[in-house]
Image: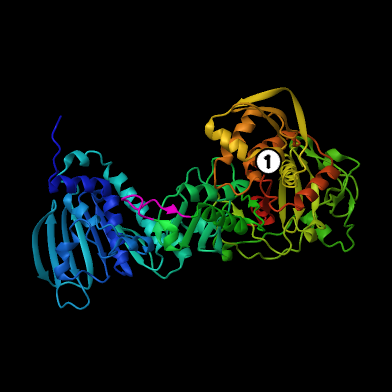
Amino acid sequence: MRKIAVLDQNTIDKIAAGEVVERPASVVKELVENAVDAGSTAITVEIKDGGISFIRVTDNGGGIPKEQVPLAFLRHATSKIERVEDLLQITSLGFRGEALSSISAVSQMEVITKTQEALTGVRYIIEGGREKSLEEIGAPCGTTMLVRNLFFNTPARGKFLKTAMTEAGYVSSYMEQLALSHQDISFKYMVNGQTRLHTSGNSNLKDVIYGIYGRDITRELLPIQFQCTGIAISGFIGKPVIARGNRNFENYYINGRYVKSKLLMKAIEEAYKPYMMQHKYPFVCLHYTIEGESIDVNVHPTKMEVRFQNQSAVYNATYDAISEALGGKELIPEVELEKKERDIKKQKITAPEPFETVYKQQQNIEKSVSYVREDPQLYAPKSVGLKPATGSFTISQVTKPRTQENLPTVPVIKEAPLQEKKEPDVVPKQTPKQMELFEDALLSPKARLRHRIIGQLFDTYWLVEYEDKFYIIDQHAAHEKVLYEKLLKEYANKDVLSQMISPAQVISLNLQEDAIMKANMEVFREFGFEISEFGGREYSIHAVPVDLYGSSVQEFFVEILDSLENEHAKQPLELITGKLATAACKAAVKGNNTLSLKEADQLIDQLLGLDNPYHCPHGRPTIVSMTKYELEKKFKRIV
């Protein structure tokens, strides 16, 4: 057995560097955070070769006094805290005093710094943790940190770095996070001599989001302003139409610190769950202000993790803030056939066909006639699957049957007077817009009186005209949503019916599950279960909820039991929303089923009464829209 011995300082420094300096992005993070803590209003970051060969961070902050420069590179030397009590009220991004020591141990560093009071600046060179020189030099106020040849003295660690392009990508991602978390600082970021990011520092978060994510995402944002005891949340969230296949667009900051938190991640995604399809993730940019003693940032050397003293309060605040922002908005995706022109001066409105003009001149048009025609095939050819039905259909007066001799008398859909339209913003084809809540929204009671149900398409979709838009409603998604809300209401009101099962199913639990089961027996009863102790840690299930079609009794029971173990669940009802969604899906009318006009009208009325009628329980849209403008563009009425 080897003898126990104290490691030499060189080895200690390299081990410490391994905890803090993982890759060039880690170096940039530590240096930029120091620049932010120095009170800088402008910070420039430049990297070459992915940051492996060259990193430069320049700021206009307070600078470092000459006599303190060498001290700054000693381990655990910091100006951020003085005693252990200060850890409870940390307001700076850095505080451990490990960054400069760790970086200098595995690179060649040069520092140029000057304080406001000093006449000259200081140039300090340190390589591999060893001081090379300290001299006076002319310099502007602030600090410039240069890091060259990262891991030059630890080549084994350098072999684990990715390509220069990949490493630069990590740095770029972090710079974007810094810009989003400190919109009051102007950041300039350069890669191999080219500027990749430059923010104004005007404290406008939306401007920063625009500069990083572009116009398509910026115009689909909803503001967040939420406050409760000890917690304030501000920022922006994206409408559900901004859906991504990963969590890269979930950004949240605690007291200006960019962090990763499973707690916040879960709260965000649970709030979006009714509005978004499975395996899709939202865009959020949320800033949290939490009292210092309520969080612990001294968790990991990279300072990317935090602990919350009251996890439930943070979870609930996040969930409520997002739910309130999404609630009450009319979120109908708008389908666009082609990109709109930018310049209205180039737009030309063409005249209608001659036979249309004849009917525009008629003064007394019958505004409501039966939808049933003498020859329904004329108006609803089977080739497009349009089903005639009874009901109100506003068209011009029906005159003679269609023949070659009297072709100009063909009925036409009523059109608004021809007028020049103002050009809307350019909307790229790949990112559909969503409508904001306005006075006469599609599903408002006032608007319902002016809906015109045209018919059913492909035995699945109902077509509705309202104002200058035409809407397509998926009957399965709509019915699924209505049934889901009905089931939720029944469970919330504890009006759940149970059905007996024979034979009863016996469940065996471990010690932890048994404790949870005994503490939450009432929850299972409210959900429609009848359970009795069977001896030891075994339980007998005699009855289950009647509405959960096709669900395995044991699977459903275990799912609730596992969810009860999660202390962050807001209420027991949330534990079974997934199962209720499945039940509603199985019970809802399917596609390729014909509904009557009366049934469709009643379904739309039921949809009208829901808080979120725009998405089924699985996040699929129930309604999409298309503007008259888009159709006219497609038919070259507007060119």
The residue at the point 60 percent across, 32 percent down is 558
Task: Relative to 317, say whether 114 is above or below.
Answer: below
Q: Is residue 400 left or right of residue 481?
A: right
What percent of the width, then of the height, locates residue 389?
86, 42
Q: Is residue 285 left or right of residue 590?
A: left
Q: Position of residue 540 (x, y in %)?
A: 67, 27
- Counting from the top left corner in percent of width and height, residue 405 is at 86, 46
What quarter of the picture does the C terminus occupy? bottom right
Q: Residue at x 72, y 52 (%)?
A: 470
Q: Can you tell which quarter of the image residue 584 is in?
A: top right
Instruction: Give me the residue at 87% from left, 64% from top.
Output: 363
Which sits in the foreground, 296 or 103? 296
The answer, for residue 64, to whether it is visible in the render is yes
SS assignment at label 1? helix
Kind of residue at badge 1 = Glu
Is 10 in front, or is 618? 10
Residue 349 appears left or right of 83: right
Magenta: predominant secondary structure element? loop
Q: Quadrant of residue 424?
A: bottom right
Q: At which x and y percent is residue 499?
A: 77, 30
Q: Is residue 105 left or right of residue 581?
A: left
Q: Is residue 246 magenta?
A: no
Q: Is residue 554 above or below residue 430?
A: above
> What colour scheme governs how the chains and residues are painted in the rendered image of this protein?
rainbow
Which quadrant would the N terminus be assigned to in this image? Answer: top left
Q: Which residues are magenta?
A: 297-309
Q: Which residue is mark 1?
A: 522
Q: Residue furthest front?
A: 536
Against 531, residue 155 (above or below) is below
Badge count:
1
